[in-house]
Image (cartoon, rainbow, N blue to C red):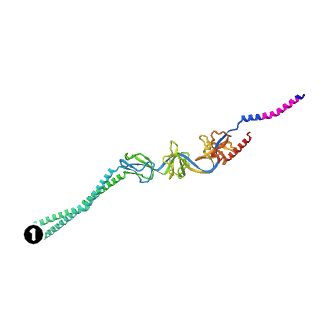
Amino acid sequence: MTTVQANRQKAQSKRQKWLLPLCAVMMGCSHSEEAPPKPVVTVKVVPVTTEDIQISITAPATVFPREQASVAARITAPLHDLRVHKGDTVKAGDVLATLESRDVVAARGEAAAALTDAEANLQKTSGGTLPTDIERGRGQLASAEAALNQAQKIYDRRSELFKLGAIPGRDLLTSQTDLAKAQADYDVARKSLELLKTQSGEKDIAIARAHVEQAKAHLAQADAQLAFTDLRSPFAGTVTDQFQYPGDMAQPGTPTFIVMDLSVVTARAQVPESQVGQIRIGQACSFMSSDAPASAGPGRVTVINKAVDTTRRTVEVWCEIENHSAAVRGGVFGQAAFITGKIPAAVVVPLAAVQFKEGTRTGTVMVVDAQNVAHRRDVQAGETVGDVVRIIEGVKPGETVVTEGSYSLPDGAKIKTGEAGKEAGKDQTKAEGKEEGKKAEKEP
């Protein structure tokens, strides 16, 4: 081999030494470009916790007031003045509106005058005319009695003289006739006096008293008619509706106001027939209206219907609730919950963390590991209480689950916690920072 050839081989050998590492670097770069890193998804997470939860049966319910009244006029008259309007709070007996009353006032005055006349007639009958008639009858009876005594003496005297032959028989007959007439006059006078005392007087007084009572009844009726010109609230509550205004003709059968007592309300729920057997009278219950996030106060079961709605296969159950703060409005729709038991230290997650299979209590959650990687896991859910759900099987306390952003999140995806999940996922955030720091050091 010549010296030139030897030099060429040495140069080629050196080039190969430099080219091999360069190719390796280039091949490595090409591999990295073919497999880019997985994207990082921002989600919100919370830790799995334990808490005591109550087992309850929920059912749709409608709220009814403890008392409700349609306030209507008792007489037909124009509406004169309104004292309240829809939404006002009233007390028992408060005047809600007044009716035109001039004709009623006039009728009452006429009834009062009739009563005065009847009372005067009674006083005259019992203390004036009849006593005079009685005294006159007594005088007539006394005169008849004196005449009778005189006729009796004359008859007795003439009877003795006739026996002695001193007078003729016609004189005795005349005295006997006078005695019979005097006796008849006495009997008539005595009977007349008895009639004045026992029959005529009592009947006339009774008739006069009846006229007084009749006049009093007419006056009471006029007072009632006058009272009916004021429309009053039958109990304390709230005016929830108003149908008439000043000038409208108020009449019986047409309500002017509706008043509800909402201090205590009743949520009438339709509980499925298969679940109503777990509910008992006196059990605790509550109501959550569909138009407000806050629920009413605590309640208790007061009525469980004995009949089943054959159309819906439900049983009506009443939950009576104290509503002092007026948190629930009359007629509102919502959910009634009937407490049937309690589970201590139950494993719970937010309801938003579970993706349920339709029509079942099974579903999936995204569990985040220490490397901030989300893994899909099947769970078996139990009762739902508010915004949390009990997990029977699938996760353990202390694990972290995704609450927002889990929809369509692939299994094994790299995640980053959002602003709302910093406290729950601060360990994952720290680990994520370390990983990003290491990557930054490796980058040229």
| Furthest-bottom residue in this view | 164
Residue 210 visible in the snapshot: no
> Which SS does the magenta portion mostly show?
helix
What amino acid does circle 1 point to? Ile
Q: Is residue 50 left or right of residue 301?
A: right
What count of labels does the image hold? 1
Q: Is residue 287 magenta?
A: no
Would residue 338 be seen by someone viewing this image from the given angle?
yes
Image quarter of residue 167 = bottom left
Task: Report the side of 204 relative to 15 (left or right).
Answer: left
Rendering coords of residue 271 (x, y %): 53, 46
Which quadrant: the N terminus? Answer: top right
Q: Which portion, as a residue range, is magenta?
A: 5-24
| Residue 370 point in image, percent of width and height | 70, 45
- Circle 1 — which element? loop
User: Is 40 placed left or right of 137 in the picture?
Assistant: right
112 relative to 275, above or below: below
Q: Position of residue 149 (x, y in %)?
A: 17, 68
Q: Nearer the viewer, residue 120 or 406?
A: 406
Task: Give the residue at mark 1.
Answer: 167
